[in-house]
Image (cartoon, rainbow, N blue to C red):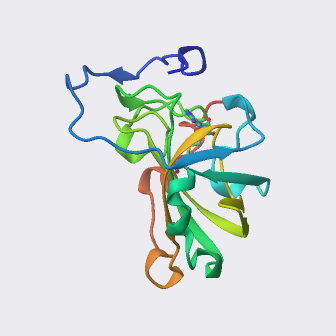
Amino acid sequence: MDVAEFGRRAGEMAVDLPERPDAGIYFIGRIRTPWQRRRDCPKNARESTALCTVELDARFVPALKDVETCSHLVLLYWMHRAPRDLVLQVPSHYNVPRGTFALRSPARPNPIAMSVVRLHKIENGTLSVSGLDCLDNTPLLDIKPYFASTDSVPDAIVGWHARADRRDRRS
Ligand SMILES: C[S@@+](CC[C@H](N)C(=O)[O-])C[C@H]1O[C@@H](n2cnc3c(N)ncnc32)[C@H](O)[C@@H]1O
């Protein structure tokens, strides 16, 4: 965890985590991006069109069969530099604490992040994609096809975000 990049803000709350994790996971590769520091990273996947590279562990390359037919993919990745104990957080542009599960913050008990990326090409087990917001070398957890027909919910809302007025925002 990179404590310096995740200073605690007033109103935030942390909890003691369980003694042991309940399951193990495999990192299936690494995501190479242009960003080394949080402050340089896009805040969300739609904020950037930078070309990034997904380097897959060679043993999983056969699992890429037919992936080249997909225009967009869901990438799940592990925010390896985020704290895991925060349950209330104050997002950087707002003054109000929100529950971790109401936020897309990387700080969460299981720091799993997701983005829908555009697939540009696949070569020798390496994917070129755009639409990412993670630090260089972020571990990759999974790759799934994005189905616009079932994954897209155009009328979905996040109430607190839609309601957030100037009082909530930092000046
Ligand atoms: C707000 S999160 C959104 C992540 C993902 N798109 C999601 O919605 O689940 C993106 C931010 O996480 C931070 N971040 C990126 N990679 C990280 C990593 N490997 N460890 C910790 N924090 C990271 C950066 O500050 C970046 O702007």
Question: Which residue is pictured at 65% across the width and 53% down the height?
Answer: 54
Count of marks, rendered view: 0
Instruction: Report x, y in % for residue 119.
Output: 69, 69
Tell me the quadrant of ligand 1: top right
Instruction: Report x, y in % for residue 5.
Output: 60, 20
From the viewer's perspective, tell me whether residue 156 is left or right of residue 42.
Answer: left
For residue 58, above or below residue 38: below
For residue 1, above or below residue 88: above
Can you tell which quarter of the image residue 21 is in? top left
The foreground one among 75 and 107 is: 75
From the viewer's perspective, tell me whether residue 170 is left or right of residue 41.
Answer: left
Can you tell which quarter of the image residue 72 is in? bottom right
For residue 136, above or below residue 6: below
Question: Which residue is pictured at 50% across the width and 59% down the height?
Answer: 60
Question: Which residue is pictured at 71% across the width and 52% down the height?
Answer: 53
Instruction: Report x, y in % for residue 3.
Output: 53, 15
Instruction: Report x, y in % for residue 107.
Output: 45, 33
Question: Which residue is pictured at 57% across the width and 79% down the height?
Answer: 66
The foreground one among 170 and 75 is: 75
From the viewer's perspective, tell me whether residue 69 is left or right of residue 87.
Answer: right
For residue 67, above or below residue 160: below
Q: Quadrant of the C terminus?
A: top right
Residue situated furthest front in the rendering:
59
